[in-house]
Image: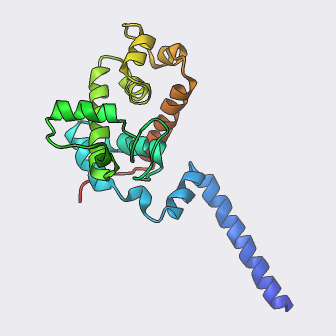
Amino acid sequence: MSRRIIGILAGAAIVLAAATGVFVLLEKDPAYRVSEWLGCGRYNAFEDEIASSAARHGVDPLLVKAVIWQESRFHPDKLGAHGERGLMQVTEGAAQDWVQAEGIETFSPGDLLDPKTNIEVGAWYLGRAMKHWAAQDDPLPFALGEYNAGRSRVKRWAGGAQISAEELSEAMDIASTRAYIAAVRKRYDYYRARGDRIQTH
């Protein structure tokens, strides 16, 4: 290999290393951004469904997207260890609550693998939880706790009182729920900080 070619390759390597360094410094979450690129559009494939369901149930669509990221990494066919299904890992019990509340005439658990249905049920459940905890100074961790661990557990942790998010976290006896809330909140803040917008097209 000639010295000229070696020089060109070395120069290209330096430029690539510099560009990578700038990317890492400027990007708040470089690992997420790379995953997003490698996902070939999967991370943005369900934005119409997110926007319409979030609007219907009074939830920020970026919060719905953050939950989807945490639950399934945008894989609509994901099956959980305890019967959770789809993008938002909805359980059959939560879906049955939705069926009764919304007067759905036909439903089978397999419908939860349909992205539109899954996002609709998940956004409904999340919106219901946000409304239930609206009296708290910061209802978001309470609603996310309910989404992950159920309302009865969050009620037990809250002790029937108005408490802070920090007090709720201290009262939690399920470490995975504490980590879940932190992860969703971090992703939600990331979407907002980089100016993401989700609107129906």
**Does 2 sit left or right of 125 as displayed?**
right
Colour basis: rainbow
From the top left corner, tell me how far across and down residue 178 is, in percent.
53, 26
Q: Foreground: 82 or 199?
A: 82
Q: Is residue 59 visible?
A: no
Location of residue 122 in the rendering, given as x and y in whole percent from the top left corner: 32, 39
Residue closer to the observer: 5 or 172: 172
Nearest to the observer: residue 69 or residue 199: 69
* Residue 9 visible in image: yes
Image spot of residue 51 (x, y percent): 27, 49
* Residue at the (32%, 20%) spot, across then down: 133
Residue at the spot 32% in from the left edge and 54% down from the top edge = 47
Q: Is residue 66 above or below residue 179?
A: below
Q: Above or below — where is 73 with respect to 161?
A: below
In the image, taking residue 119 as reference, residue 159 lies left or right, namely right
Farthest bottom residue in view: 2
Count of numbered badges drawn on the protein: 0
Q: Look at 70% across and 72% down and name the residue there.
A: 15
Q: Nearer the viewer, residue 88 or 169?
A: 88
Q: Residue at x 23, y 60 (%)?
A: 201
- Asked whether, in this view, residue 99 is left or right of residue 41, the answer is left
Query: Quarter-wise, where is residue 104 in the image?
Result: top left
Residue 43 spot, x, y in % from top left: 43, 56
> Which of the image's four quarters has the N terminus?
bottom right
